Amino acid sequence: MTSTQDNKRKWRILKQRNPKYLLTLVLVFLTSLYILNESSIFSKSEWYPPEEIPNEVIESSDSSQATSLPGDSEDISVPESFTQPEPTPFAYPSSDYGVSYKDRVDPDTHKYIVPNGPSPPGEKYIAYLPHNQFNNQRVALENAILLAHYTNRTLILPYVYFGRHNQWRPFDTLYKQNINSNTKEHLEHCKKYIGEEVKSKVPVECRHYERWTTMPWDHLFGDLPAFYENEGLKVISTVNISVEWIMANTGVDREDFHYFKDGVYYGAKIYDDPSSTTPLGRYRGRLELSEFMEIPHRVVYFESIYGTGRIMHEVKEHREFFSRMVRSMTITYPGVLPTADKIIARLGGRQNYMGIHVRVSDGFFSRNREANIKQIIERLKDFTIPLRSSSEIKPSTDFSTTDECLANYTLSTNMPLIYMATDFHKTRTSNLYSPLYEAFPCIAVLDDFIPLLSELDEIVNDVDQLPMKKFLIPLVDMVVAAKGTKFVGTARSTFSNFAYKLHRIYVDGIAEFEDSKVYAG
């Protein structure tokens, strides 16, 4: 009998004689895996942004690259349609209009069809399901405010989420995720376990309590309430966006809801100018604002309102409103600006550096990272060539650390000092970033300023008492990059989109804004 046969015989006997022993082995194995997963062995350093699920994991043979961190982007890698079977709807009726975009869009004209008719008396509302990461939620916020303004509907505004996020899914699935998992209701007792390092002491229902947090948007953007008042906007901010909550707080009947259930990431594109020739782009159907306003239902509930350019603002009045709205969305949350300003002072002040954002970690950005980095380098050269000749791009001085860079950097070197916000760490040892460092050796990153982040240690969210440091650090990174004398971002990144808008407010004092896919200026 061979050794293998002998082992199989022993294992068969063991299974027959000791079923409880086998069960114990399995339980011990599974428990060990869980403990390893929950332990700090796999945890990132304390200041890393919270773990989020990217669209794709970056594939690279470069073993020197650090673990990728989540950024914010147009989720270009999300499939156009989601083919998993829909769960049985609950808590709301099925809409008569549109189980998917195919039921709404004329295939010949691409016109998006909505119901019309006499409207019942009473206040009208817009609601929507939030999804994906912070900057995707911010784009949805912009679109929702625009549409509420156009239609004079009250906006039922969900809180902003940091850390945990729901990926886009068709309406019924996304609705369930938002109602069931985006709440800390009934978890008040979990607050006393915040910071507990021994996971076995933490109740099971509290073990993910610290992974995510939420707050009203106006806690982050403190100028929003004044903006709402000045513009005559009615906004109801709520963590609960269930149909039951809306009915209870508005008096709207269940049959007076109209749902946008497109089943695709980019469904309707709403045009404010009927004469517009702007193409649909990635969107599936054209919906005229005038026709949207004829929807009689008191509540219009969107599966998703996310997407740059989804709600057009081509009419002059609407462009002006959009610009006022953008200017009201500067970050005022405690600690963010003071911390960013400390880093900026260390860099020599706003006029002493240029900011860039390099997104490389997942999905579309992983596949196009080399091209995106090349494009950023070329745009930086556009800004800096007047200051120096190309032969001066590689100085003999060692700039392998930010300290060396700052110590040796002077205006007389004619070499730009650059602050790079990015979704990777240890960039100096990563081959991916080599072209950037070869062209512009004097690059500072957030890793170089860890001691200056200490002010964030004491900041706690009033909503759930969570320490906010790990959630605020990406915002600090963004603000530092945005306040540079010039800014160059990654095309189609919503992080770059916001940083560029902030740059134009902080540095250029621009009064008008337009959406763009390329962020440089």
Image (cartoon, rainbow, N blue to C red):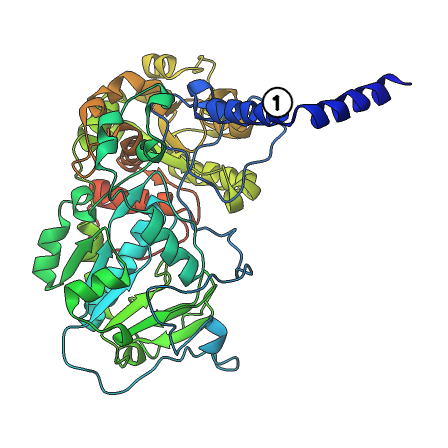
Q: Position of residue 80 (x, y in %)?
A: 52, 60
| Nearer-the-camera pick, 57 or 258 | 258
Residue farthest toward the right in the current orientation of the protein: 1
Q: How many numbered dots are placed on residues in this image?
A: 1
Residue type pointed to by label 1: Tyr
Q: Position of residue 465 (x, y in %)?
A: 20, 32
In the rendered image, which residue does mark 1 sit on? 21
User: Considering only vertical position in the picture, is 115 above or below 480?
Assistant: below
Q: Decide: few, some or many residues near mark 1? Use Cα within 10 Å; few <14, some 14-19, many ≥20.
A: few
Q: Residue at x 54, y 29 (%)?
A: 432
Q: Residue at x 44, y 13 (%)?
A: 397
Q: Position of residue 86 (x, y in %)?
A: 49, 62
Q: Position of residue 518 (x, y in %)?
A: 41, 50
The image quarter in which residue 513 lies: bottom left
Q: Residue at x 52, y 47 (%)?
A: 364
| Nearer-the-camera pick, 416 or 280 | 280
